[in-house]
Amino acid sequence: MRILAYIIKRLAWRFRSMIWLFPMVIRGEVPLNEWFSDPISIKHGIEHGWYYDRERKCWRHAKVDIPCFVRYRMILHETFIDNQYGMADYKGKVVLDVGAYVGDTLLYFLHNGARYVIAVEPVGKYVSELARNAMLNRIDSRKFTIVGAHYGKLSICDFLNAFGGIDVAKFDCEGCELGLAKDPCIGKIPEYVIEYHSNDILMELLTRFNNEGFKCSAVSGDANVGIIMCRHGIALK
């Protein structure tokens, strides 16, 4: 019954969002396909300062000078406006972005001065959207590379062998961070920003990082889902 109640509530929320957005669809301010496929996210974006740029055919923020995106997703607001990865300094650094999704973090790191980004995303449709977002913002192809599912399962050691030194690693990959806790080369990257998805995984990560001489602190979230930052041998506030 609880599942059914949730489904009904979600459908009602979706319907109300579609009604709220409909005048904007008529005026061409919201793309028809996005209105139909994800009205809840679109309503969220508009309420939080995002708008559809009809000339460039992309979503941008009205008050903050940030990249433009082919489709609005709530993660864009979390990344650029909530600044959920803003605890690290990316200027001039090589960043390993595991769970690059649609390129929000790729563009965030480059927007904040990263020298090079290795964007890892195994889901093909997200890789396609990532590439479109990079092209839309005229990102120099020499500043990033995309690693998709066709490369197979890769470790920190593999990335270091392929790209040399990596300064910061970001992980948001719905549970794959557990593999990070067992990676033999974890200590060769000095700084990590990690979204964890269970308390058990969090405990394993903290134990491993502590054994490797890292200092970790909570950035956001709770025991089950959140973000931690770990730096090698540097105390965090």
Image (cartoon, helix red, strand yellow):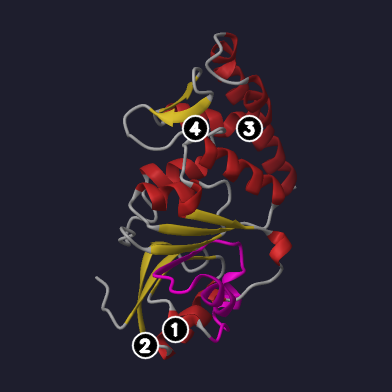
Categorize mark 1 by other alpha carbons within 10 Å: few (<14), some (14-19), many (20+). some
Residue found at the far front of this picture: 142
The tag earlier along the polypeptide, 3 or 2, is 3
Residue 187, disc? 1
C-alpha gap between disc 1 and disc 3: 41 Å
Q: Is residue 2 visible?
A: no
Taking the spot 62% from the left edge, 22% from the top edge, the residue there is 18
Q: Is residue 232 above or below residue 193?
A: below
x then y, percent, for residue 181: 54, 80
The tag earlier along the polypeptide, 1 or 2, is 1
The magenta segment: 157-184
Taking the spot 39% from the left edge, 44% from the top edge, the residue there is 80
Label 3 sits on residue: 38
Categorize mark 2 by other alpha carbons within 10 Å: few (<14), some (14-19), many (20+). some
Q: Which type of secondary structure does the marked residue at label 1 adopt? A: helix
The tag earlier along the polypeptide, 4 or 1, is 4
Q: Which type of secondary structure does the marked residue at label 4 adopt? A: helix
